[in-house]
Image (spheres, rainbow, N blue to C red):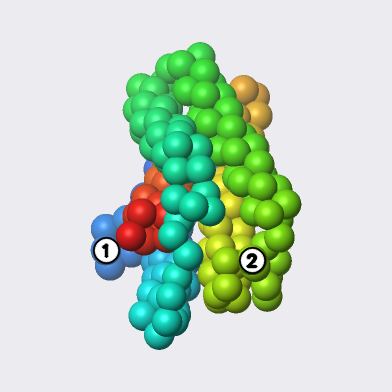
Amino acid sequence: METLVHERSTPEVADAVDEVAQSPFTANTRKFGMWLFILSDALTFAALLGAYGFMRLTSPEWPEQSGVFDIRLITFMTFVLISSSASMAMAVFAAENGERKHTLGLLGATIIGGIVFLGCQAYEWAHFIGEGGTLFFNPWGVPQFSASFFLITGFHGFHVLSGVVLLAVVWVLSLLGRCSANGVELAGLYWHFVDVVWVFVFAFFYLL
């Protein structure tokens, strides 16, 4: 009987079996694992932003962000990433309703949003380096400024890149009919986390 179950398994059956193994927090094991990963990553970002705040408080001066960065570009990047979060949420809804065509389209829109964001960030990095900024030196007089920039935005950019790769895999699996709604939802949880983190980076690093 167990062999038959495995032979006839589909993504939907896998979800149903997974739901039986409930965690104490009433989430299936895969979703619970994703939440644990997100929590640990959130603590890492909190530590980075906390260290950044400490350096700003202990530095005698700090460069004016508007004099270094193109805030219009950063605002556009933020808009793109938030919009991609909306398309991701709609993709999850479409997947739950069995609308594969809409799911693929919305996942594709989310992937494009992530790629646009990464392209803008690459341009921003190129401009920053072109102005003379390096990991341990910059022409604005505070070495910690460029170190914070590369570490915080680079770490977040790596998460966006990882999210784009993850969504691309989910898109291909959905195209082949091998990805369940639960799989799309798990990818969505990670993408929403990446978007929320950027809102904090945007607020604390570029605005304050």
- Residue 36 appears at what percent x and percent y? 42, 66
Q: Is residue 54 above or below residue 119?
A: below
Q: Nearer the viewer, residue 45 or 38?
A: 45
Report how many numbered discs are placed on residues in the image.
2
Q: Nearer the viewer, residue 51 or 20?
A: 51
Q: Give, as a three-letter code, the residue at label 2.
A: Pro
Single out the residue that lies furthest toward the top: 101
- Residue 196 appears at what percent x and percent y? 37, 51
Q: Nearer the viewer, residue 184 or 51?
A: 51
Where, by quadrant of the figure, is residue 172 drawn? top right
Label 2 to label 1, Cα distance in Å?
A: 51 Å
Single out the residue that lies furthest toward the left: 25
Image point (65%, 68%), residue name: 138
- Residue 65 appears at what percent x and percent y? 45, 56
Where, by quadrant of the figure, is residue 52 drawn? bottom left
Q: Is residue 122 above or below residue 128?
A: above
Image point (53%, 31%), residue name: 113
Q: Secondary structure at mark 1?
A: loop
Q: Which residue is mark 2?
A: 139
Q: Residues within 10 Å of mark 1 (few under 14, many from 20)?
A: few
Q: Give, as a three-letter code, the residue at label 1.
A: Phe
Q: Which residue is mark 1?
A: 25
Image point (52%, 49%), residue name: 69
